[in-house]
Image (cartoon, grey):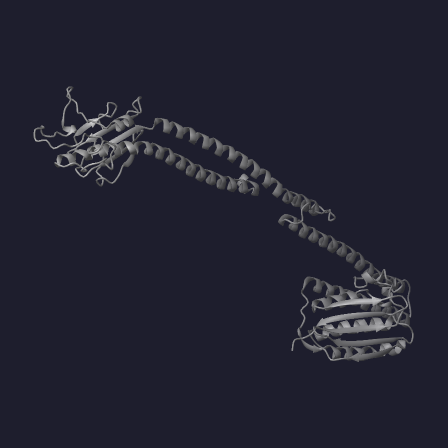
Amino acid sequence: MFTKSIRWRLQLWFAFLLICTLSGFGIATFEVYRTRQLRQVDERLAPRVEGLARVMRGPQFIRGGRPPFESGRDRRGGGPPGSFDGFPPYTPDERRPPFVPPWEATNSAGGIGLPLPPDLERLLGEDQQGATYFLVWNAEGTRLHASTNAPTDLSRPPATTPDSGPHFRTRDGHREAYDYNREGRAVLVGKSIAAEREALRGFALMLVGAGLSVLALGLGGGWFIASRALRPLQDISATASRISGGNLAERISVADTENELGQLAGVLNSTFARLESAFAQQKQFTADASHELRTPIAVLLSEAQTTLARPRSAEEYRETLEACLETAQQMRRLTESLLELARFDAGQEKLRHEPVDLAEIVRASAELVRPLAAEKGVQVHCDLAPGRVLGDEVRLGQVVTNLLTNAIRYNQVAGEVRVRTVPSATNVVLTVADNGPGVAAEDLPHIFERFYRADKSRTAARGRTGLGLAICKAIVDAHGGDIEVQSAPDAGSSFIVRLPQAAG
């Protein structure tokens, strides 16, 4: 199913984030644009409703029997001195008829009349197409005045704090501004916002189109980037399939080693290289083990067949049995060495880790091989400084004995073997050096490999299995140390073992 694909999961997640981002940006942009449009309408309605409110406030001062100002120009209005918001100057005259407010007078047509200052009348009459309308209500909610295009069913707006400034609302495709004075009279100016709404719809369509374009571009780019990013995974999968088919030499092509997938490919290539090397070693090991076991088995079969071919004396049977016994012991040593290496390879060899003096181990091993050295006429010289290491005494003794035995066997007649232990800051260094024929340079890199013999004439018939140095290296590695060899033809060989020093 496509939802199990990493590419599709990344694509769906990216699409979700992109849609959320574009939606949020589009909504915020639309709201900003809508607010600006309404603000522009409000800026046109505000002076109209404020002008009507001034007209509604004027007569209340006149009715009180005093002019709003004693003389001079009105501070809020634009009329002549002594006037108020365009109303005629107040002149006290007892012979004049009582004052009648304009909204209580009726015109000849029976309608409600309201005298407006010229500037306000011009402001309200700017829209000749009837887009702007206005209404006036008294405190009881009765309509006092209305423009010809005002809605007939429009009721008085909800009451607000008197003289608190214009309030705005949107109603049925109209934007309206209204205000109340202290006497409870209300004025309202409204305007159709059909043009603004049409502009908003166009702007919304433009936002949707731009959003869809960005979404399509983003999804296409995301698909391309995801494909490029996941292509190394496909290469890794294909390469792993070919390797599992038996082509161990196959490697992943790494174009960019700096990114995470490049680093992963590098690690996998290293792993594949180690696997190839391990399989090659296993193949070589199997071939060598088969070869090493074939010789003693052939000897056993040959001795047995020869002996049974005709009747023989007791002495001849005894010689045959001794030859078979020696061959069987050789096979036993070989199989034990193989099993020992197999346990080290599998990490199943249990070693004791306790503080031991490496100098004492070397001294005991040197005493053990002195009969062999005397037989070969080799002198063993020891220069042993105490050095405590953390390890298995038996296994370390096996390493030292093996190195001393090799130094004696592969030495010259009347040769010398020098053994030293030197503690350092962190390690204890063991050196076993001889003055024998040495090892050729081309053989040094392979000296610790299993079944490898620098001298091809040294066969298993002489009791050598070619596993001694490999076992020494496995034991030293298990103790966290290292072993190396320094040699040259006719200059002797030196095996150097470094083991971590025990704390305290």
Which residue is located at x 69 percent, y 68 percent? 480
> Residue 148's quadrant in the figure?
top left
Left or right: residue 164 versus residue 490 is: left
Left or right: residue 377 versus residue 108 is: right
Q: Position of residue 174 (x, y in %)?
A: 30, 29
Q: Position of residue 105 (x, y in %)?
A: 14, 26
One can see residue 331 in this view: yes
In this picture, is 295 found above or below 91? below
One can see residue 468 in this view: no
Left or right: residue 320 versus residue 174 is: right
Farthest residue to the top: give it. 109
Query: Which quadrant is home to the N terminus?
Result: top right
> Residue 357's quadrant in the figure?
bottom right
Asked whether 151 or 476 is in front, the reply is: 151
Asked whether 442 or 157 is in front, the reply is: 157
Left or right: residue 224 versus residue 450 is: left
